[in-house]
Every structure is written in C-alpha cells, then in structure tokens.
Image (cartoon, grey):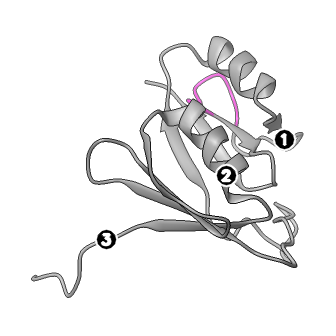
Amino acid sequence: MQAIAQMRAVVLDCPDPRALAGFYRALVGGEITYADDDWVNLRDGGNVLLSFQQAQDYQAPDWPNAEHGQQFHIDVTVDDVDQAEQQILALGARRTELQPGIDEDSNWRVYLDPVGHPFCLCWD
C-alpha cells in the first residue's frame, strides 16, 4: 500500500515552548532547529521532529481520567531505567502513581513531563 503522506512532526501544545523543548532535548538529545515565542522545533538528527506550540489556555492531560485523557504519549528507550528516572525527575518530570500493567515482566514506567504530557521510559 502506498502512503498518502509522510510524517512531518509531532506537535505538543504547552504553555512555554522553549522550556518544554529543553526538557525533551535533555531527555532524547537532538538540536533546536527553529525557535520563536510561539513555536520550537527539536530534531533528533534523523527523521523525528518534535515541535512545541504555545497554547494560551493550555490544559494538561489528566491521565488516566477520560475527561482530559492522555491525548497521546511518547515512548523512549533507556539502558538503565533507575538512572534515567533520577535524571528526568531532576528535569521536572514526575512518576505517575498509576503504573498500568506493571509487573516483574514489564519493561516500561509511566511519567508526566513538566506540563503533564505522559511518556514512558522503556527498556529491553
């Protein structure tokens, strides 16, 4: 099947695009390729482009509440989840109380970025 389009970017609404782009740059690396007061682009060096757009009346997701559910989430892979957790908590992330499906065979933990978007640290 031939694709109709190619992925261009994943865009996150937020109250402060520069601050949230800084959080994700510390988390996944990459370079800021464009920034103004309302928009910031973060490219990972390959094809992934995360963009951050200012939303004046931003309302954070309230996962797992369905009224303001997760909207989307990002999974990132780490080598040492405990070390990565310490680092992201220092950057302003927070670990969620609810960790769905977590047991001794699970390979992910759920967190919220500084403005409430859920993301998971995953490992092999």
| Residue 63, position as x, y percentages in the image | 82, 60
Label for residue 96?
1
Q: Secondary structure at mark 1?
A: loop
Q: Label 2 belongs to which residue?
A: 18
On-image quarter of the C terminus: top left
Left or right, 15 with respect to 122, comes to: right
**Identity of the residue drawn at 79% across and 22% down:** 90
Q: Nearer the viewer, residue 33 or 117?
A: 33
Looking at the image, is mark 3 or mark 1 earlier in the sequence?
3
Q: Which residues are magenta?
A: 102-108
Look at the picture and state if 68 lies above or below 75.
Answer: below
Decide whether residue 106 is among the magenta residues: yes
Proximity of marks 3 and 1: CB atoms separated by less than 8 Å = no
Looking at the image, is mark 2 or mark 3 earlier in the sequence?
3
Check disc 2: other Cα within 10 Å, few if <14, some if 14-19, many if 20+. Answer: many
**Identity of the residue drawn at 87% across and 63% down:** 62
**Label 3 vs label 1, nearer the camera:** 3
* Three-letter amino acid code of the residue under disc 3: Met
| Residue 5, position as x, y percentages in the image | 23, 82
Considering every residue shown, the one lying at the far left of the view is 2
* Three-letter amino acid code of the residue under disc 1: Thr
Q: Secondary structure at mark 3?
A: loop
Check disc 3: other Cα within 10 Å, few if <14, some if 14-19, many if 20+. Answer: few
**Identity of the residue drawn at 81% across and 54% down:** 115
Left or right, 115 with respect to 31, comes to: right
Label for residue 7?
3
* Three-letter amino acid code of the residue under disc 2: Arg
Distance, label 1 to label 2, CA atoms, is 24 Å
Left or right, 110 with respect to 90, comes to: left
Picture quadrant where residue 1 is located: bottom left
Decide whether residue 69 is among the magenta residues: no
